[in-house]
Amino acid sequence: MLTFVWPLLFLALPLPWLVRRFLPSVNRSEPALLVPDLRPFQHSGAGQRSRRGARQALWYLILLWLAWALLVTAAARPQWQGEQVSTTLSGRDLLLAVDLSGSMNIEDMYLGNRQVTRLEAVKSVIGEFIRRRQGDRIGLVLFGTRAYVHVPLTMDTNTVMQLLQESTVGMPGPRTAIGDAIGLSVRYLRDRPGDEKVLILLTDGANNSGQLEPVRAAEIAAAENVRIHAVGVGGQPAPGSGGFLGGVRERTAEVDHESLAQIAELTGGRSYMAHNTAELEEIYLALDQIEPIDEEVRTFRQVQALTHYPLGGALLLYGVALLFPGGRLHV
């Protein structure tokens, strides 16, 4: 859409005509040449030259008017506005802490009819959760024997999803340092502005590594106003398997439900347990409802300045007009 920043400047279009019409013209007090008789200056080609001169004068005047119109258009600052674009902003900081200990490689979960590892199921469900959180600042903490921030808080959810998909079991070590993961997350969120700081912790085991006890880490989180939702995950043995899957004993009992519940309660969050992919999906759908996105919709248009086009056209027309006999540079 074409718009003008100062459209009232178009009122100046008739200014040259008004000046010529109402201001007194400059007349000579003495004629330039006094002659008693005009007959010596008359010859047969005078009429043809007069008509040609009239046409040149007309074109000269047209060029000057067009150049003036383009100058006024340039002064009005034309610009092209693109389609209206809306963006959603949120004041919520949301960290996802994902367990990558060795037990996440157990194949006791299903995606459709395909048996997959716990991590594969988690990637699928959390990936959809991240996709739905447009407008939030999402960060990713990975933990095993140690914990580290894999993706700082960002509104670029595509990058968070991609780096989550690229993570593998054992990257941070084979054991489970839940307390350290909470402590690192709280330290990272401590200096963030705003009051909405949330950590969603997912693990399939109990704390068996690290320097900080999970309950103590939760107390620190509560003091820093960080709310923790704790999710335990672990599959159930397939029918007739006798508790084994692929030669590995089913490990659901290793999840420390009591500690997870205490962590959530201390920080004002909730605790969950997922035994299969469907339950995990329901948990993250519930978290969407518990932690709604604080939406602030802003709209804007991309604006492209066009002033240089009419300005360049005006200069070009003035240059052509100077070549006419009425101008000063004609040859």
Image (cartoon, helix red, strand yellow):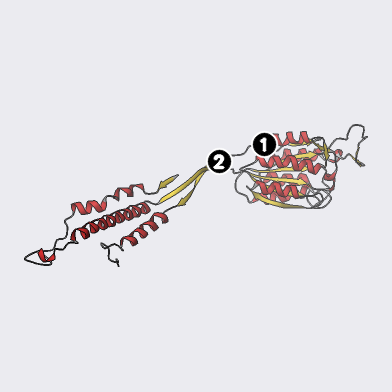
The one of 180 and 133 positioned closer to us in this rendering = 133
Q: Is residue 30 visible?
A: no
* Drawn side of residue 250 relative to residue 29, left or right: right
Residue at 33 percent across and 55 percent down: it is 67
The one of 138 and 225 positioned closer to us in this rendering = 138
| Residues tagged 2 and 1 counted as in contact (Cβ below 8 A) | no
Residue type, mark 1 in image: Asp
The residue at the far top in this view is 239
Q: Find numbered disc 2 in the image and state the secondary structure of the residue it sits on.
A: strand
Q: Which residue is mark 1?
A: 288
Mark 2 or 1 closer to N-term? 1
Residue 244 vs 139, above or below: the answer is above
Q: How many marks?
A: 2
The one of 299 and 177 positioned closer to us in this rendering = 299
Residue 217 vs 315, above or below: the answer is above
Dividing the image into 4 quarters, which one contains the N terminus? top left
User: Which numbered tag is attached to residue 296?
Assistant: 2
Residue at 24 percent across and 52 percent down: it is 17
